[in-house]
Image (cartoon, rainbow, N blue to C red):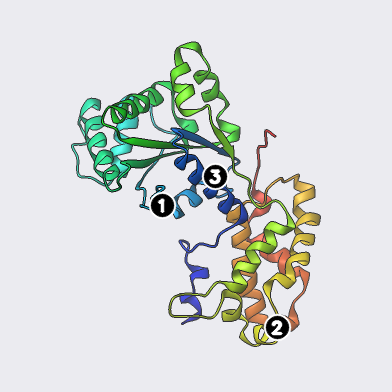
Amino acid sequence: MNKFDHPIFDPFSHVETRGEIKLFKDLQERISKRHPSVVIEGDSRLGKSSIIKNKKNAFKTRKGEPIPMIYTSISETDNRTIRDINYNLVDYTLLTFNKNAVSKNLATTMFEFIADKAHQNSQKTAILVLDEAHHMSAKQYRAILNLTNKFNVFDIRIFVISIVNRAEVESLYIQMKRSNNSGIYNRFFSKKTSFKGIRTKTDVKFILDQYDQTPSSDREPRTYTEFFLPKDFKKGFRLTDLTDDIWEVYLKHYKSPMKLVDWPAEHFFDMLNTLLPDYLHQYGLRAYTKDMIVDAIDKSDLKNYTAHYGY
């Protein structure tokens, strides 16, 4: 395998975090218990959306049958009308449809599409993901409520996942808590889970261990670490050996001065995918210093990250 063919350079490659595993287990349990919905809260850039998309084919019924997922992301520029949400849902299916169709026809198209997907398993279950749902309005959620109610008539079960940024969702919560929206709130907002990103040295070590153990590809059995540092790996070096150094640098230069609760996954993996191939591989382990970690973190633009914590 050529160096630049390695999945470390593929923006769609994926290595699991502890937070991801925990969230997946939480969602799978809720699905098994037949919960109607859940809200996933968290700060921006932690990897909430990426995790759900990476697990698109992983959710199962109690019988072990795959549960199809229908994903849509809500744009901030939407007018927040019922037609907009119906249009958005259909648009993300990549179906060919009349873009001038009225809202009712769009809703019918979406109902038929999801119903067909749900019938792929014996429990007639599908997952509907509303990403960036803090951009939605109460009337748009009412359209989703009407859609799920229609599915109930046909014994089709839809598990709705709303993904929101904690700092931007408060106004939507205020709308939902009004008495005329109580039905919407109870259906979609009464159950919440918080996504926690990379917060501890244990979290960091877990990811580094994935690089030490995960084969580079089906055709390249060497692990991520071994591929870039074959001689050092053979001598016993593991990326987890740098756990203390990485955490110390992050704590001293970034976490404490920036008052970060989470190390956003996007920035963490940018750092790691610079440190391993561009520093350790290129200059060799003998040349390693903590300054390499500082440079790799700086190149991830972590200093430009702004968090908004409400907890």
Mark 2 Cα-neighbour bin, 10 Å: few <14, some 14–19, many ≥20: few
- Compared with 61, 252 (above or below) is below
Nearer mark to the viewer, of 2 and 3: 3
**Tag 2: residue type?**
Gly
In the foreground, 236 or 28? 28
Q: Who's the residue at 50% across and 19% down the image? A: 175
The image position of residue 281, as x and y in percent, is 63, 79
The kind of secondary structure element at disc 2 is loop
**Tag 1: residue type?**
Lys
**Camera sees residue 278:** yes
Contact check, label 2 and label 3, Cβ < 8 Å: no
- Checking the image for residue 26, the label placed there is 3
Q: Which residue is mark 2?
A: 236
Residue 266 image-quadrant placement = bottom right
Q: Which residue is mark 1?
A: 56
The kind of secondary structure element at disc 1 is loop
